[in-house]
Every structure is written in structure tokens, then in C-alpha cells.
Image (cartoon, grey):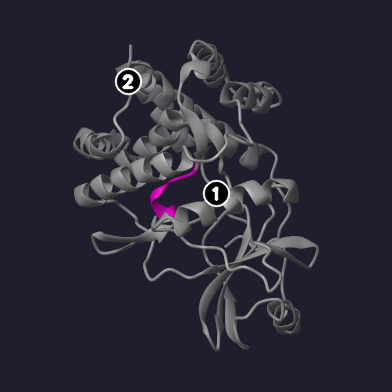
Amino acid sequence: MSIYTTVSREELEAYLLNYNVGTLESFKGIEAGVENTNYFVTTSSGEYVLTLVESVGQEKLPFILGFVDHLACNGLACAQPVHLNGGELFGELNDRPAVLMNRLNGGPLDVPTLTQCETIGKVQAQAHLLASQLPADQYTHLHQWCTETAAPIHAKLNHQQDTLLASALMAAGEIPWTNLPTGPVHADLFPDNALFNHEHIAGLIDFYHACSAPYIYDLCVTLNAWCYDEDSGQYNDDKANALLNAYQSVRPLNEEEQASLNAMQEVAALRFWLSRLRDKLFPKDGEFITVKDPAGKQSLLELLRQRNG
């Protein structure tokens, strides 16, 4: 569990007065998540998830929550922000931006099935089509992000790791970034950020890594996360083909996206390897903190680079 900011019952009761959600009945910390503080909240009017945002600055929340609200209002299955009484999408609790969302009736996945991979491919493609209706604000230049994040990490790696990092950064710089279709994306669509009821999707959650980036990058994050087993080191091509084909049945990739697919999968692996290395080597303080092992993403990056020649 990651609880960086604790909330008392009295504090939560006072905060909920900003919403038309009834009176507080119960709440508890969520035993998942890495970067934000999350609570399940039950009131007299229903069930919600409260997030105290620790991972991004308040200035980014209008973009993130506006994107989520746009998706939900246009019928995409995702957790929708509850508006405050004044119409705002977020408030403030214990000196943190606070977001209340409707709780979805589903659970996160451990090992996705082939059908679930097909479903997420279609949903992600639908999200990208809806995202194309919005301006590409909060653009993240991923090669630059990786280069800057890697700078303090280089000295802490062994020779093999440092060589891998340097070569992956060089390859990322060769992608024609500006030619790729770009817009708001989830950017962190791992299986635990999609809730399912058996084979049926309940909705997407945790958009706090959302930014504007190439849609193909967002797709590659999902391919890596849903089709590679970090424990066994195996990449499931059947799942990958099912996910990619389902995506393209809704939003076909153009020629440049298809040409960049393999290289972008490496960038997606590199990005999460770096973020896990950063969290492990330079940890944040908190009451309960979850830090993911970077070894799985390093192994994925090595595998992808071997497969792609």
C-alpha cells in the first residue's frame, strides 16, 4: 500500500461537504498503487474512490481530469470524476489536490486472457479516437524525458546495464517523433489500471500519467504490459497479435506508426525501466510505499532489442 498522506474521518467528512454525495459511512486505504494516496469511500449515496494526488503538480490536473471527463461523457468505460458543488473537477485535502471518482464495479487483472487483451485493444483505440477531438496539451517528449531521467542513474548501474541504457537511448532518438499522430493518452495502461468483471470491462482507471504523446507509444505501453510476463520472462505473441488486431479494427495504424512499432515498444520498456530504477535508487518518503522491481522491465527491454535485431 502507498499512503503518503493520511486522512482522518473528521477531515474526510469535512471535505465531502464540497460534493453532493451524502454523508460518510466508511473509508479505507487501497492496497494498491505506487505514486498517489487512494481510499475507498462509502457514503449514503454510493461508493467512490478518493485520490490525493502526489505524483503530478496541480497545474496538470485540468488537462488530466478534463481528458477523463471527455472520455466518460462520450461513453468510454472509465472512472468519471465527480464534480464539486461549484463544478470543479478537483479540490484540496490536507494540502494535496483531491479527486473523487465513482467506484467501478470490477477488479484489476493479474494475468489477462486472450479475450481481455482483445477488449483492451478496442477500448484503447476508442480512447485514441476520442482523444483526437482534444488539443494535444501537456505534450511529453519521451526521448527527452528518458535522457533526463537517466542522467543521475548512469553512475549507479553496472557496465552491462549502462551499455543497454546508452544504446536504448540512442535508438529512441532515431524515431520520427514529430511525424506520428499525437494526442492525450493514458500512458500507464497496465492490467491493474483496467477493471474487469470476468471477460467484460468495467472501465479504465488511474490516468495520472496522462499526457499528450504519440498514440503508438500508448499502444506499445499496453502491448508490453499485457503480453509480457515479468516472472517467466516470456512474451506472448498470441496475446500481442490479438490486442493489436483488435486495436486496428477500430483505429488502423498508418504507415509511419507501423514502421515505428518495434522501436516504440523498446521506448515503452525503457521508460518504465527508468522510472522503476529512479524509484528504487531515489525513493520517496511515505508511510507505506510500494516500489516495483526494475529487473522485469530491464529483461523486457533486452528481449525486445534481441527480437528486433
Tally of numbered tags? 2
Residue on which disc 1 sits: 67
Q: Which mark is residue 233?
A: none
Q: Secondary structure at mark 1?
A: helix
- Inspect this view and state whether residue 203 appears: yes
Q: Quadrant of residue 199?
A: bottom left
Residue type, label 2: Gln
Q: Nearer the viewer, mark 2 or mark 1?
A: 1
Vertical arrangement, residue 137 with respect to residue 113, above or below? above
Q: Quadrant of residue 136?
A: top right
Left or right, residue 224 beside residue 30: left
Q: Which mark is residue 258?
A: 2
Vertical arrangement, residue 190 with respect to residue 224, above or below? below
Residue segment shown in magenta? 186-193
Residue 153 x/y as whole percent: 66, 27
Residue at screen point 34% across, 48% down: 123
Residue at screen point 75% across, 84% down: 10
Magenta-colored stretch includes residue 190: yes
Q: Reading the chain from its start, which is encountered first: label 2 or label 1?
A: 1
Which one is in front, 187 or 17? 17
- Inspect this view and state whether residue 287 appears: no
How far apart are the two marked residues, 2 and 1, measured between alpha carbons?
26 Å
Mark 2 and mark 1 in contact? Answer it, CB < 8 Å: no
Residue type, label 1: Phe
